[in-house]
């Protein structure tokens, strides 16, 4: 039985100013398809979101998009997805993405991506689940955040008794192997009932 069926990708609806970001998103989408791992993401056709989804679909992958109905004027809804779920709120969007995922990966992005990443870090710290979370530090994008978290530890706002467990890599090809290893060694079975429902 496959232990990694679907990965939730958090990333920007913009491409950023470094071509490395787009190339990494495309590479990740292709790798997911090759490994027969589904992608669940925010449902947009633009930015890194669209780059990863398009690459996965082009390689024969399975892609699930989840997008609020009020984003019609802000983001272009992706077409030809394996499944498109239209929701009423951001809370509902995040809940469905959580429920569909076996693991989470954060690529470069803006405030929305940061908020999604921070929420998963919080849930992990509070032992609400133990699904792996990997920060894809493409081109060193997340180094300021990683430095801030080290500062929080040094200032004893992140204590050893409430540590935050996450993975970090700068290399796209390491993402899936690292997640598979974490799933194999995780502490306990996932209980989705522990996560609050919105």
Image (tube, rainbow, N blue to C red):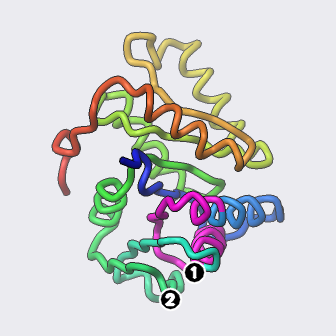
Residue 48 vertical placement versus 128 (above, below): below
Q: Is residue 180 left or right of residue 89?
A: right
> Can residue 78 be found in the magenta stretch?
no
Callout 2: few (<14), some (14-19), or many (20+) C-alpha neighbours within 10 Å? few
- Residue at mark 2: 79
Q: Is residue 165 left or right of residue 49?
A: left
The span picked out in magenta is 31-57
Q: Quadrant of the C terminus?
A: bottom left
Q: Is residue 33 left or right of residue 88?
A: right
Q: Position of residue 73 (x, y in %)?
A: 48, 88
Mark sitting earlier along the chain (1/2): 1
Mark 1 touching mark 2, by CB under 8 A? yes
Tag 2, which secondary structure?
loop
Q: Position of residue 42 (x, y in %)?
A: 46, 69
Q: Any mark on residue 45, and which?
A: 1
Question: At x 52% / y 81%, what residue is drawn?
Answer: 75
Q: Position of residue 137 (x, y in %)?
A: 70, 43
Residue 198 vertical placement versus 154 (above, below): below
Q: Is residue 25 left or right of residue 36?
A: right
Q: For residue 11, what is the image quadrant?
A: bottom right
Question: At x 68% / y 42%, what residue is drawn?
Answer: 174
Cα gap from disc 1 to disc 2, whole angstroms: 7 Å
Front-lying residue, 194 or 111: 194
- Furthest-front residue in view? 1
> Can residue 41 be found in the magenta stretch?
yes
Q: Position of residue 184 (x, y in %)?
A: 44, 31
Question: At x 29% / y 27%, what residue is drawn?
Answer: 188
Q: For residue 12, what is the image quadrant?
A: bottom right
Q: Any mark on residue 194, and which?
A: none
């Amino acid at each position: 039985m496959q232990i990694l069926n679907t990965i939730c990708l958090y990333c920007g609806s913009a491409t950023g100013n470094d071509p490395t970001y787009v190339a990494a998103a495309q590479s990740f989408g292709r790798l997911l398809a090759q490994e027969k791992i589904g992608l669940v993401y925010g449902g947009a056709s633009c930015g890194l979101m669209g780059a990863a989804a398009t690459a996965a679909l082009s390689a024969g992958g399975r892609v699930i998009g989840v997008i609020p109905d009020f984003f019609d004027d802000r983001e272009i809804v992706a077409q030809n997805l394996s499944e498109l779920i239209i929701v009423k709120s951001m809370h509902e969007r995040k809940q469905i993405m959580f429920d569909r995922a076996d693991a989470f990966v954060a690529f470069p992005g803006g405030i929305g991506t940061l908020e999604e990443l921070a929420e998963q870090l919080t849930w992990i710290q509070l032992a609400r689940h133990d699904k792996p979370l990997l920060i894809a530090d493409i081109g060193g994008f997340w180094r300021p955040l990683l430095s801030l978290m080290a500062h929080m530890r040094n200032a004893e706002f992140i204590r050893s008794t409430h540590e935050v467990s996450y993975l970090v890599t700068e290399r796209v090809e390491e993402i899936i192997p690292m997640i598979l290893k974490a799933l194999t060694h995780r502490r306990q079975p996932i209980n989705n009932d522990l996560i609050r429902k919105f």
